[in-house]
Amino acid sequence: MIQNFFHSKETPDLNQEFFLNKKNFIIKIPKTLIISGGSRNGNHLIWSLLDGNSQLPYLPGEDKFLSQVFWRAFKNKKKFKREFLNDKFNFFRKLNGIHYDKWERIYLRKINIKKWAGAYAAKAAPLQEFPAQLDLDLNYIKFRNYLKKNIKPEFNFYYFFSLYLKAFKLLSSKKGKKIKYTNIYAESGLRRELLYLLENNAKIKCVVPIRKFESFYFSITKTIFYSSKINNKFIKEAWERWYHKTNDYLFLKKKFPKQIIIVKFEDLEDISKREKYMKKICKKLGIKFEKINMFPTHFKNNVQPNSSFTELFRGKKKTKFRLINMKNIYSLIFPKKKIPRKYFKIYRFINKNSY
């Protein structure tokens, strides 16, 4: 069933110098936890539930650096190298937001609070992870100074990723003898990147949330079409997004069963099931379950769900957020007869291989 790796079509030539040079050093990158499922599959939910655990570093937020390295090497490897060597520091740090340094903009408070990660189809890294989120107290100056001091004209993947992780953890440094992972990183859609890292013996574990297509449909169409209607155009778009990404993550699970942890979004969204399944996830990660893992937080501050069905409204005194027509959302039912047949076989595989 899971045979093809769809993302190979947009994977750069891994035999080019950038990926070959020092690839044997990838195993030396310290233990790293990655959270990466397809977009609108619960990435924010899982990392916000892990956020306060005393044995994990804090995660500043999702970051585009890793996928941008692969994307630019795929699109135009000569241009990628030229732009890096021409302006090493500024080019390098702006990969995290695609066109800008995401962490600098957050530090400077250049944020549009209407545009959190689930509110719209972003063309760049969203600066606001959750609605009604408090300002983040990031150590941006440490991050910036470390990169500026240590950047060198060395053009290979190992150097790029290892340097960035060292700087990235300075944004939200958390010290303690109990920390089980040196690094933590989150970005949706990292299939080709995970395959390359794991094939080169990277010491990583990746938590991959997967959502049922029936509810994914409403989340993704609300985000990209601003609609919850069911029609053939929307179904085709939603299915292509769900199927290809899900297939690739399951391909990775088959190939690297101990490194890839598949979790079901619905088990974590349902508060009555959450403790049971968060305990399973923590056990797989080799960390102790703590009560804070029952509650979505960011830097231990409570956060609202990163839902496509959240809107901004203005009261008389202050700005607030709310779920849109909450009763109607949970009554949305995707007709079973319109679900592609192969979905049911895929989801049986998910049930057998989760946790």
Image (tube, helix red, strand yellow):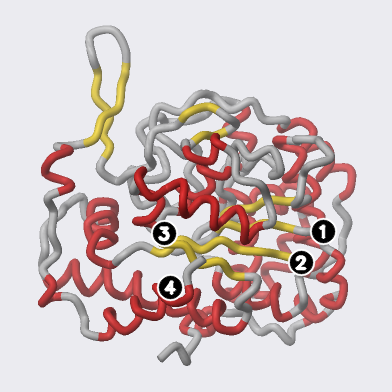
Mark 2 vs mark 4, CA separation in Å: 23 Å
- Which amino acid type is shown beneath numbered disc 1? Pro
Residue depicted at x 35% and y 81%? 346
Mark 2 vs mark 3, CA separation in Å: 24 Å
In the drawing, does residue 228 fall left or right of residue 129? left
| Circle nearer the N terminus (2, 4) | 2
Q: How many labels does the image show?
A: 4
- Which amino acid type is shown beneath numbered disc 3? Ser
Residue depicted at x 64% and y 61%? 66
- Discs 2, 3 touching: Cβ within 8 Å: no
Residue corresponding to mark 1:
30
Local packing at callout 2 (Cα closer than 10 Å; few below 14, some 14-19, many 20+) is: some
Local packing at callout 1 (Cα closer than 10 Å; few below 14, some 14-19, many 20+) is: some
Residue depicted at x 72% and y 57%? 32
Q: Position of residue 176 (x, y in %)?
A: 81, 36
Q: Where is residue 237 in the image (x, y as percent from the top left)?
A: 26, 70
Mark 1 vs mark 2, CA separation in Å: 7 Å
- Which amino acid type is shown beneath numbered disc 2? Lys
| Circle nearer the N terminus (4, 1) | 1
Residue corresponding to mark 3:
39
Quadrant for the N terminus, please: bottom left
- Discs 1, 2 touching: Cβ within 8 Å: yes
- Checking the image for residue 245, the label placed there is 4
- Which amino acid type is shown beneath numbered disc 4? Lys
Front position in the image: 303 or 85: 303
Residue corresponding to mark 2:
203
